Amino acid sequence: MASEKGSSVASADNINHNKPANHVLDERRRAALAEVDNAKFSWFHVKVCCVAGAGFFTDAYDIFAINIASRMLGYVYGHATGQTLNTNQDLGVKVATPIGNLFGQLFFGWLADAVGRKKMYGFELMIIIIGSFAQALSGSAPAVGIIGVLVVWRFIMGVGIGGDYPLSAVISSEFSSTRIRGRLMNAVFAFQGWGQFTAALVALIVTAAYKNSILNDTTANHAPVDFMWRILIGLGCVPGCIALYFRLTIPETPRFTMDIERNIQQASKDIEGILTVGKSNVDPDAVVQRVEAPRATLADFIAYFSRWENLKVLIGTSWSWFALDIAFYGLGLNSSIILETIGFGNATSKGNQAVYDNLHNICVGNLILSVAGLIPGYWVSFLFIDSWGRKPIQLMGFSMLTIIFICMGFGYDKLTASNSAKGAFVFLYCLANFFQNFGPNTTTFVVPGEAFPTRYRSTAHGISAASGKLGAIVAQVGFARLKDIGGPNRFVQHILEIFAFFMLTGIFSTLLIPETKGRSLEDLSNEDQDGFLKGPTRTAEVRDGMIVQ
């Protein structure tokens, strides 16, 4: 089987000495890449999907759990504001993670291109695990309150979560064959939906487990609830710990070895090993002959993105993600209205019973909202992303979201005037969640992992993702303060109208991106692949005390 898989690589090794060295090297490179692009679906692809997806599961769990945990924190530490966190405290614990995401996406995106996908993969997960566990152990002191401590640790955790975006996207993209690349990346990203669902499910289980303790509690600060939020947040470590070993043992992508480390011989061996036994072996004593290829430097970065055909793709991916996340995160501002409409708003009971009922309601309500729109959207996108293509799905998603937000915004007063009308509002809300995931929320993750050359693929994905998190920060900080202008929730309808405007701009930014379906990553890079390699280097290099040529 190994000889079968490596046949084209082996034929490329049959060097014709009458050809120039760079031509021979180009042939070997193309033959090796063709092995990856045309590979049949295998258990190695499943492993990559599960290992990368476990990180996104953890990311979504940690981000989403705080929406429920903040309510628990209010009961324990919010006595000054009527058993809720004040506006700044609530905003702080929720926005710290997106701010950390932004820094993590930029930093780890650059690092993955500079030092390697494998060297960074797992390191960002360690940060997430440490950040999650530290939150569960947080306490207060005279010099600092517990909310301040949580904000710091949630920022640190957010840096790790941010690093997971470019790393998982690029690794799943570079290991995948062309015909299944969209579905593989989509499946990785879809783990987010299950992470959100699991956070609400775990919160519900924890609430049920502590029901008697809550109802029989006689303390002023609801001591049982203090255990509950710590368990909820701390359990976010578990999937990360399970995935950590597999991330640390995943091989380097052949494209990084070939195009950035410039080691075609090792990349060819890696491809044969990965496609046959799912592993690659690196001989530390092997003589390494490097080739001349375009290198990632500041001058080269500026030269590459100064060409409009390349810059417009980066603008398209970045703005599309920015516009989408303004609405994706901002839509959460209306969740209280939705929960009340479906019967899971604030409880009418009193005392300890009200504490239990409120926590139970928010858990069940969020489970319903996850199942009603979020999770189905991911998997409908999975069915069509490699047949319809990324660009049509993104255009359709932004178009539908524009229409939905126009209806929700301009019809807000009538849609919330009666219980029967609120049913229509709930339907539109769930429909918006559906078309975000069967639309730009999925494609804005996929396209940046495909549309750039190997030496800038992770960096460009990090820039695009960080643009999205900037939109999330704008939504959470800016719009959260706008919604009560003129009275409680009186400005929400205008916020929905603003969302419609940003969805409209997303339609135009989508026109800047290429259709990546069915095309190789090298074809999408907008670089001439003939003569991409200039021949072997003439200078010797020293590695681990050995001279290599």
Image (tube, rainbow, N blue to C red):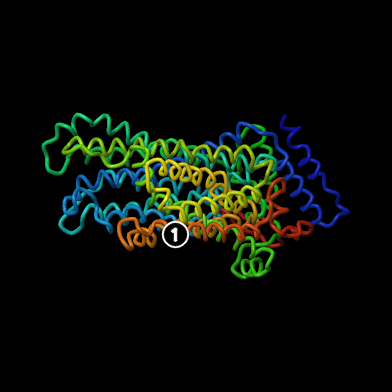
- Residue density around tag 1, few if under 14, some if 14–19, many if 20 or more, within 10 Å: many
Q: Looking at the image, which is closer to me, 48 or 492?
A: 492
Q: Residue furthest right?
A: 18
Residue type marked 1: Phe
In the displayed structure, 309 sits above or below 198; it is: below
Q: Looking at the image, which is closer to me, 89 or 62?
A: 89
Which residue position is annotated with label 1?
103
**Residue 169, image x, y percentages:** 56, 48
In the displayed structure, 534 sits above or below 363; it is: below
The mark total stands at 1
**Residue 395, image x, y percentages:** 62, 52
Q: Which residue does the image show at 61% across and 49% down from the upper left?
A: 396
Q: Answer yes or no: is residue 298 visible.
A: yes
Q: Looking at the image, which is closer to me, 299 or 359?
A: 359
**Residue 377, image x, y percentages:** 54, 40
Q: Quadrant of residue 457?
A: bottom right
Q: Which residue does the image show at 43% across and 51% down from the upper left?
A: 331
Is 261 situated left or right of 130 in this image? right
Q: Secondary structure at mark 1?
A: helix
Is 220 situated left or right of 172 in this image? left
Q: Quadrant of residue 204?
A: top left
Q: Quadrant of the C terminus?
A: bottom right
Q: Which residue does the image show at 40% across and 41% down from the upper left?
A: 61
**Residue 4, image x, y percentages:** 76, 32
